[in-house]
Image (cartoon, grey):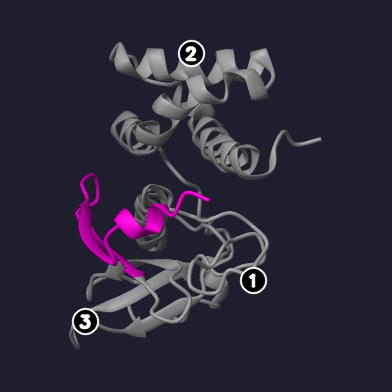
Amino acid sequence: MNNEWENEPDYLRFKEDTTGWECIIKRTKALGILCGYVVIPKDSALYNKHYNDELFNNIKVHGGLTYSEYEETDDEYLIGFDCGHLDDFAPYNQDLYQGTYKNITYVEYMCLRLARQLYELSNAKSNRGDNTMTYTHEMIDQSLICILREIATRAIVYKDNIKNREYTTITGHITQLKDGEHFNTLGAKATIQDLIDKMVEYEHIRKYGVKE
């Protein structure tokens, strides 16, 4: 098994550029899994909201929201998720889960995705009555660039293990982005989700062989 967590940081703080919201990634000492958080600004409608509030029912993130607490400093309220579910893998307790390890790139992508969702949800409370997401070209491209660091190198490796149509689709997206083109915003959400799902599927293939 490739113990990639040994070469990853245990803590990472970064900003989602299109919203300006801060994100944090931490590794737990007990299990070695990564957890991702978004720092909620004090002037946001989401500040001090519990993660299981119905307000967050439409939020999509790995495993769902599992955390909402004051941390780092008294002025920072965090909402986040963890990678400690049945389909995950715990480096420090490898018999606990039977899934795949969610690495720093995956969690970074999820944090950026969560930050944009929470930002849009915060704005929606004052601008409209629903939780409809809006995607700009810049948001779409930034999300894809984040995970392309993994997919661009792995697509070739997995070529013989996946259907040719899927390989062609993935590499086509990579070429399109590298050429400076934008994805159609109407299909952006599906495209991003499909790519991240494929990355997880490739991890399964690498560890356990071709999926039936």
Q: CB under 8 Å between callouts 3 and 1?
A: no
Q: CA distance from mark 1 to mark 2?
A: 38 Å
**Which residue lies at the image location 57% right of the left edge and 25% below the top edge?**
158
- Badge 2 crowding class, 10 Å Cα cut-off, few under 14, some 14 to 19, many 20 or more, is few
Kindly identify which residue carries mark 2: 172
Magenta residues (range): 1-26
Image coords of residue 162 (percent x, y): 66, 23
Q: Earlier in the sequence, mark 3 or mark 1?
A: 3
Q: Is residue 53 left or right of residue 21?
A: right
Q: Is residue 65 above or below residue 154?
A: below
Q: Which residue is the extreme one toward the right?
A: 212
Instruction: Assess whether residue 14 is covered by the magenta stretch.
Output: yes
Q: CA distance from mark 2 to mark 3?
A: 42 Å
Image coords of residue 134 (percent x, y): 42, 41
**Which residue lies at the image location 39% right of the left edge and 13% below the top edge?**
175
Front-most of residues 56 and 204 = 204
Q: Amino acid at mark 1?
A: Asp
Q: Earlier in the sequence, mark 2 or mark 3?
A: 3
Mark on residue 95? 1
Mark 1: which secondary structure? loop
Mark 3: which secondary structure? loop
Q: Amino acid at mark 3?
A: Glu
Front-most of residues 113 and 210 = 210
Q: Is residue 205 visible in this depiction of the protein?
A: yes
Q: Is residue 68 left or right of residue 204?
A: left
- Badge 1 crowding class, 10 Å Cα cut-off, few under 14, some 14 to 19, many 20 or more, is few
Mark on residue 72? 3
Front-most of residues 92 and 170 = 92
Mark nearest the camera among 3 and 1 is 1
